[in-house]
Image (spheres, rainbow, N blue to C red):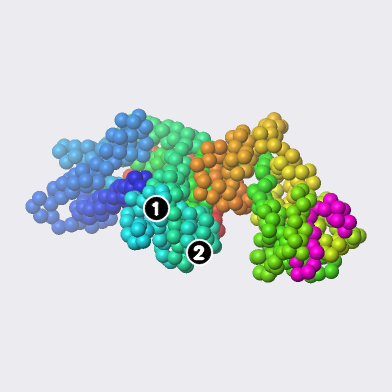
Amino acid sequence: MKHHHHQHKAHTEHTEHTKDIMWRAIISTLLTVPVLLYSKSFQELIGFSMPSFPGSEWIVPIFSTIVFLYGGTFFIKGMVQELSRKKPGMMTLVGLAICVAFIYSMSTTAFGGMDFFWELTTLIVIMLWGHWIEMRSTLGAKKAVEEMVKLMPTKANLIKDSQILEVPVSELKPGDLLLVKPGEKIPTDGTIEEGVSHVDESMLTGESKPVMKSVGDKVIGGSINMEGAIKVRVEKTGEETYLSQVIKLVKSAQESKTRLQGVADQGAFYLTVIAVSVGVLSFAFWLYLKEDFQFAVERAVTVMVIACPHALGLAVPLVVAFSTSYSARKGILVKNRLALETLKDVHAVVFDKTGTLTEGKFGITNVLSSKLSEDELLRLTASIEKVSEHVIARAIVETANSKGLKLEEVEDFKAVPGKGVVGKVKGYHIAVGTTLLMKDLEVKEDEELLKRIKELESEGKTVVLIAIDGMLSGVIALADRIREASYLAVGELKRMGKKVIMITGDSEETARYVARELGIDEFFARVLPHEKVQKVKDLQSTSMKVAMVGDGINDAPALIQADVGIAIGSGTHIAIESADIILVRNDPQDVVRLIKLSEVSTRKILQNLFWATGYNVVAIPLAAGVFIPWGIVLKPAVGAVLMGVSTLIVAMNSLLLRRSLWD
C-alpha cells in the first residue's frame, strides 16, 4: 500500500505548506499595523499622527525588517529556485520588487530621504494572502484524487481458521478470505464467495445506483457494502487495485503537458523578462524626467508586482487538475491529455457494435403466439430448453425465470444437432428449433406466423419456431439487444456534428437493422478483428480525424491507429495499453460526456489564457505610469492586489469547470 502512503504524504506536505503561508500572512499582517501607524508618508496620506516616544523612530524600520525576513524570504527563496532552474516567473518578480523596496528604504534610514517601508510591508502581506488563497484553490483541484485515497479502508476482517481477525489492509494477500459487514467499505478488489448485497460504487465508477452483487461477482476496494454480510476472496492488493490504478492514471494525466501548456509556459517566461525590462526602463525614464528617486523606484516596483505570469502559468494546469480528477470520479479515465485535447476536433466516431452499442448477449425481442398467451408459450418453450446448454436456450430460460414463470418437467427429451430440441411437457408434444426441424417433423404451417418470421429475419434477428402437437404455434425472436443509452448517445453525437459509424463482424442484415434503429450514418459489416484497423486508416485517408470506441481487447490495433482510442466498459480492467481514454462503465453516453469534457476544458484554458494575457497587456503600462498624464497613478500595494485578483479569477474560472461538465 506504499502508493497510498506517498499520496497521503504529498497531500500532507501541501496542506502543511498552505498552513505555513497562512501563519506567515497572519504574523506579517499584525506587524504591518504599527508600521502603517508610525510611517510618516502613511500619516501624511491619511492626515493623522501618532504620539512619539524615545525610540519610536525605530518602530518602522525594525518591524519592516522582521516582516521582510519572515514574510518576504518565502518569495526570495522562490526567486532563487526559479533562477537556478533558469525559469524566472512570479517569484522572481515579487522577490526583486521587495528586495529593491527594502534596500532602498534601508538606505533612506541611513542617508535620509522618504522611505518605502509601509508600501513594502503592505506588499508582502497582500502577496502572502494572495498566495494562500491561490494555494487553497490548487489544493481543491488535487482534493478529488486525495478523496479517492481516503476511500480506501485501513482495516479488514480476515477469516482465518474459522476465526475473524481485524488486520491492516496492507497485510492482505491474494487468496485471503474477508468478511465485509453491512455499511463497511470493501477493503480491496476481490470476488464474492458467499452472500448477496447491494454495493455503492458511485465514488469510484460514477454508477449512481447501488449495484446488486452475488456469488461470483467482482467487487472494488473502497466501495461500500450496503446491506447483507458478504465474504470476499481477495484478488488484488496494493498498487494493483482498481483504485490505486485510477489514482496513478489521474496523477500522470495531471502532470502530462498539453499543447496549450507549452504556449502558457513560454508566455509566462517572456512576460517575466518583459516585466523586469519595463520596470528597469520605467525607473530610468522617470529619473530622466527629473522625477524624484523614490517615485522612480515606486514605478519599477509596481511594474514587477503587477505583472502576473502566475495567472498564465496556472491557466492550464488548474483546468487539467480539475477536469481529470472530477471525470475520474465519474468513471472517465484520461491517460493521454493530448488525445483529450484532440477529441473535440474529431470528425467521426467509430463504434464497435457488439457490447458497445448493443448489450453483447442474446435477449428476447419478440414472442408471437397463434393460440397460447405469450407467457404460456415462453413457459413451455423454456421448460423444454432448460435441459439444453445452447446460448439461445439459456437466453429463453433466463427470460422465463426473470418473469417468475414456473417451468415444467420434460419427458422424452431429444436434441436434434444443429436443428433444435423435441420433448413432452404437460402432455403436449413440443418441438423448438429451426425451419429445417419443422420440415423434418412435417409440422402444419401457419401463414400469418410465416409472414412475421420473414419480417423478423430481415431485421437480422435469430428466429426460433415452436410447434405444439404438430402445429406451428409460435415464434420467439432473439437479438443482441440495443442499449437504451445508444439511442441517446448517437442522437447527441449527430447534433454535435460528428459522423457516427458502426463496425461489426455480424451479418449485413443485423448491421443494417441496428444502424437503421440508431440512425447511424454509415456501417461496415462482416469485418474481422484484424480488418478494423484498415477501416480506420481508410477513414483517415479522407482527411478525417477519427475516434474509435471499442472494448480495448479485440480492437486494440484499431484503437491505436485512431486519432483517439477509447476503451469502453473496461470495468476494473483499466490497464489497457491501446486506449488513450478509458470509460469504466459500458455507457455510450460517456462518449458524449467525454467530448463535452474536451470542449469545455479547452474552452476554460483559452478563457484563462485570454484573461491572463489581456490583464498583463493593460496592467504593465498602467503600473509603468503611462496614464499619469490623466492622473492615474498606481501604488505598489494596489498593484499587488490587482495581481492577486488576476490569479484568483483564473482559479475560480477553472473551478467553474465542474458546473459546466456535470450539472
Q: Looking at the picture, how far across and down is residue 123, in whole percent?
A: 30, 47
The answer to which image quadrant residue 161 occupies is: bottom left
Residue 25 vs residue 577, the one in the foreground: 577
The answer to which image quadrant residue 384 occupies is: bottom right
Q: Is residue 249 visible?
A: yes
| Residue displayed at 35% across by 29% down | 86
Q: Which residue is mark 2?
A: 196
Region of the chain picked out in magenta, as a range: 425-443
Q: Looking at the picture, how far across and down is residue 162, in whole percent?
A: 36, 61
Q: Which residue is mark 1?
A: 176
The span from disc 1 to disc 2 (Cα, nearest Å) is: 19 Å
| Residue displayed at 47% across by 58% down | 193
Q: Looking at the picture, how far across and down is residue 308, in whole percent?
A: 40, 41
Residue 548 vs residue 153, the one in the foreground: 153
| Residue displayed at 24% across by 46% down | 71
Q: Secondary structure under badge 1?
A: loop
Q: Amino acid at mark 1?
A: Asp
Q: Looking at the picture, how far across and down is residue 43, in whole percent?
A: 23, 53
Q: Please, which residue is most extreme toward the left here? A: 54
Looking at marks 1 and 2 on the same chain, the residue that comes earlier in the sequence is marked by 1
Q: Amino acid at mark 2?
A: Val
Q: Is residue 625 visible?
A: no
Q: Secondary structure under badge 2?
A: loop
Mark 2: few, some, or many residues within 10 Å (few <14, many ≥20)? some
Confirm whether the magenta stretch covers residue 527: no
Kindly check if marks 1 and 2 are in contact, taking CB atoms under 8 A apart as contact.
no
Q: Is residue 523 left or right of residue 45?
A: right
Confirm whether the magenta stretch covers residue 441: yes
Residue 310 vs residue 635, the one in the foreground: 310
Q: Please, which residue is most extreme toward the front here? A: 412
